[in-house]
Image (cartoon, rainbow, N blue to C red):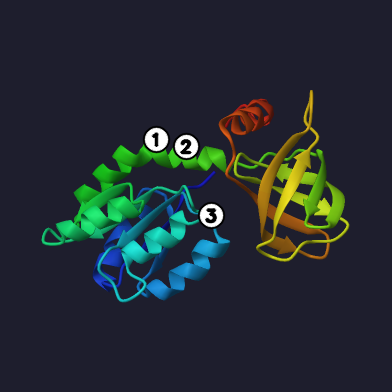
Amino acid sequence: MATRVLIVDDDPANCELIREVLVSAEIDCVALTRSELAIGHLATEKFDAIFLDVNMPSPNGIELTRKIRSGGLNASTPIMVITGEDERALLTLAFSSGANFFLYKPVDRHDILRLLRATHGSIENEKRRFRRVKVQCKVSITCGSEHMSGTTLDMSLGGLFVQTSHVLPLGSVARVSIDLKPEPLTVSARVLRIAGEDCMGMQFENLAVNEAKRLQDFLLPLLPKTE
């Protein structure tokens, strides 16, 4: 499962340097120099790590960090912020907004590789959460007064892809009951993707510790032995 990283830096040279180093480490990258374009990518694509320049035209790195942490596919993705030595106050603000790691400018190849080594565990944990397992389980979905049943096509610790009689609007939050043994698991999930008229991708929201453990205990034995 390839690592996929988003880079957002309005300095083209800096953005390209980070992209080159990551590509040399066989990491798939989306590199953007316009921060407003990042919002669409973050809403529709799952990344394993995110590099954000702090000081950019709006939305700057802090604004993007807050938006990422507010919910969605990348709410728990590790965030590395890029800042200058004279922007320490901004760095403190970035951490309080949800950033995990930092790089000081001027960024060099050694610093990027060192950060990759330091964050390897966090990135792998995030990938594991979203590793999909092809599995069919019966599900019941309730959204307001609407009720429907369906079958999962795949699942991960982050969500599920389900086939139903019809789909809910994007952004809808529903209660999903998954037919796990010895008793169903009922969780909250948001519709993030629609595929055709009868399939939708849903992300779990605010999983309790016991709910996450039940999902993990169910899914891990189903992973291929090479994973």
Query: In this figure, which residue is indicated by the disc labeled 2?
Result: 125
Query: In this figure, which residue is indicated by the disc labeled 3?
Result: 46
Q: Report the disc number at residue 97.
A: none
Q: How many labels does the image show?
A: 3
Contact (CB < 8 A) between labels 2 and 3? no
Q: In which quarter of the image is the N terminus?
A: top right
Q: Which one is nearer the viewer's eye here, 7 or 194?
A: 194
Residue extending furthest top? Answer: 182
Residue 60 coordinates in the image, percent (x, y): 32, 69
In this picture, residue 6 sits left or right of residue 147: left
* Residue at image location 77% in from the left, 62% down from the top: 168
* Residue at image location 33% in from the left, 61% down from the top: 52
Contact (CB < 8 A) between labels 2 and 1? yes
Residue 141 coordinates in the image, percent (x, y): 80, 49
Task: Say if residue 143 shows up in the picture.
Answer: yes
Contact (CB < 8 A) between labels 1 and 3? no
Query: In this figure, which residue is indicated by the disc labeled 1?
Result: 121
How many angstroms separate mark 1 from mark 3 (CA)?
Answer: 17 Å
Residue 63 coordinates in the image, percent (x, y): 36, 65
* Amino acid of disc 3: Lys
Residue extending furthest front? Answer: 145
Residue 195 coordinates in the image, percent (x, y): 75, 62
Crowd band around label 1 with a 10 angstrom C-alpha radius: few (<14), some (14–19), many (20+): few
